[in-house]
Image (tube, rainbow, N blue to C red):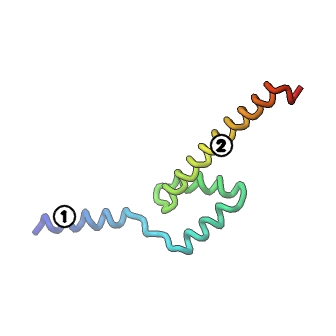
Amino acid sequence: MEEAVQIEQRANAVQKSIAPQMSIGGWFITFILLAVPFVNIILLFVWAMDANSERRNFSRAYLMIIGIMLVISIIISIAIFALGASSGIFG
């Protein structure tokens, strides 16, 4: 009997630690906020560092995608500049 009570207490503790799911309206507002320049980056960092946020994993993945795209665009820009410089366009 005592073991059943302990199992129920553990289940209640786990259920309390799980954040409630966001509604469609919550996600809609999230995407609207992410469409605003500069606010989106700030909010992504805030949500990524929040321990109890529904948006935590989404924010981390979004920041990773932004970082990967930034690196790719820098590499492409350097390659285009190098090709242009080697062809004599710039001088």
Q: Amino acid at mark 2?
A: Leu
Q: Quadrant of residue 31?
A: bottom right
Q: Nearer the viewer, residue 70 or 43?
A: 70
- In the image, what residue occupies the spot 31% across and 62% down? 14
**Looking at the picture, how far across and down is residue 87, in whole percent?**
81, 27
Instruction: Give the number of the mark in front: 1 or 2.
Output: 2
Tell me the quadrant of the picture where the C terminus can be found.
top right
Query: Against 70, is 48 above or below?
Result: below
- In the image, what residue occupies the spot 64% across and 61% down? 34
Q: Quadrant of residue 7?
A: bottom left
Label 1 and label 2: CA atoms lie apart by: 50 Å
Q: Amino acid at mark 1?
A: Gln
Query: Against 64, is 53 above or below?
Result: below
Query: Against 41, is 1 above or below?
Result: below
Which mark, by number, is residue 20?
Answer: none
- In the image, what residue occupies the spot 79% across and 25% down? 86
Residue at the farthest right position: 91
Q: Residues within 10 Å of mark 1 (few under 14, many from 20)?
A: few
Residue at the farthest front position: 87
Q: Residues within 10 Å of mark 2 (few under 14, many from 20)?
A: few
Q: Quadrant of residue 72?
A: top right
Q: Secondary structure at mark 2?
A: helix
Number of marks in picture:
2
**Looking at the picture, how far across and down is residue 90, in whole percent?**
87, 29
Which mark, by number, is residue 70?
Answer: 2
Question: Is 28 left, or right, of 86 in this rendering?
Answer: left
Q: What residue is disc 1 on?
A: 6
Q: Nearer the viewer, residue 87 or 11?
A: 87
